[in-house]
Amino acid sequence: MKSVITCDIIKSRQYSNLDRDEINKLIKTSFNDCCNLVPEAYADKLSFSIIQGDEFQFLINNPEYAYQFVVFYRLILSQSELKPTFRAGIGIGDVSITDADSYKMDGSAFHRSREGINEFNFKKHKSRLTIIKSDNRQIDDELNMICIYQDLLESKWSTKNRGSILAKIKYKTLSEAALHENVTYQAIQKNLKAAYWEIYFVGIEYIRDRLNTTLTG
């Protein structure tokens, strides 16, 4: 079992052609940065593909880390000047065709990822950021209910909130994060509290553990 993640840049039409070129570079370099930040995901760097600057896709070999990877990826992008963000359809299943270009692959993971990204077209999902699809409808309903609340919290994060969260992830402790970001310990702590990061991270861990139990059980 693997995870295919199909992503769509939000409000991509607001960017100029020059900005779109820059965003293409950003999503590629940020993907590589996220691979280093979440090595447990075993993201397949060769599978990364961009289509028309609006949509991109990649493969995660450890699907239980797919949601965590997506969240951290958005955090990395939020620190760039253009601050692009994206919706993600996470599909979990088989990959039946192997190719360097993920858009030339096939299998249930790809179909489910596409189903997830297509659901954002429905009015009830317009404000969503992440949708998970697997072969277990009951698990999907459970995890997507959590994602609804996670998405709501994430959508309210400020740039400072996101910067502090990313620093905490990178440097593990608040003191180290403050030192490397050249801000006070109190400022990092305040931003994390305002973002409800501790509660949010419980959601990340729950989704990861639930998927791990389901996939290995």
Image (cartoon, rainbow, N blue to C red):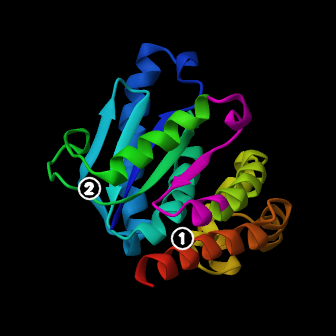
Let me know if residue 146 appears in the view: yes
Q: Secondary structure at mark 2?
A: strand
**Residue, x 63% and y 69% (percent of image)?**
204
Q: Is residue 133 above or below residue 187?
A: above
Q: Position of residue 215 (x, y in %)?
A: 43, 76
Q: Is residue 28 above or below residue 11?
A: below
Quarter of the image holding residue 199?
A: bottom right
**Residue, x 48% and y 78% (percent of image)?**
212
* Distance in Å between CA atoms under marks 1 and 2: 20 Å
**Residue, x 42% and y 14% (percent of image)?**
17
Mark nearer the N terminus (1 vs 2): 2
Given residues 182 and 70, the one toward you in this image is 70
Q: Position of residue 73 (x, y in %)?
A: 50, 54
Q: Residues within 10 Å of mark 2 (few under 14, many from 20)?
A: some
Between circles 1 and 2, the one closer to the viewer is 2
Mark 2: amino acid: Lys
Q: Quadrant of the N terminus?
A: bottom left
Asked if the residues shown at circle 1 and circle 2 are in contact, with their CB atoms under 8 angstroms apart, the answer is: no
The answer to whether residue 153 is left or right of residue 102 is: right
Residue indicated by mark 2: 45
The answer to whether residue 54 is left or right of residue 79 is: left
**Residue, x 32% and y 55% (percent of image)?**
59
Let me know if residue 84 appears in the view: no
For the magenta stretch, what is the residue range?
122-141
**Total numbered badges shown on the rendered structure:** 2
Q: Secondary structure at mark 1?
A: helix
Residue indicated by mark 1: 170
Quarter of the image holding residue 49?
A: top left
Mark 1: amino acid: Lys
Q: Position of residue 60 (x, y in %)?
A: 35, 61
Q: Residues within 10 Å of mark 1 (few under 14, many from 20)?
A: few
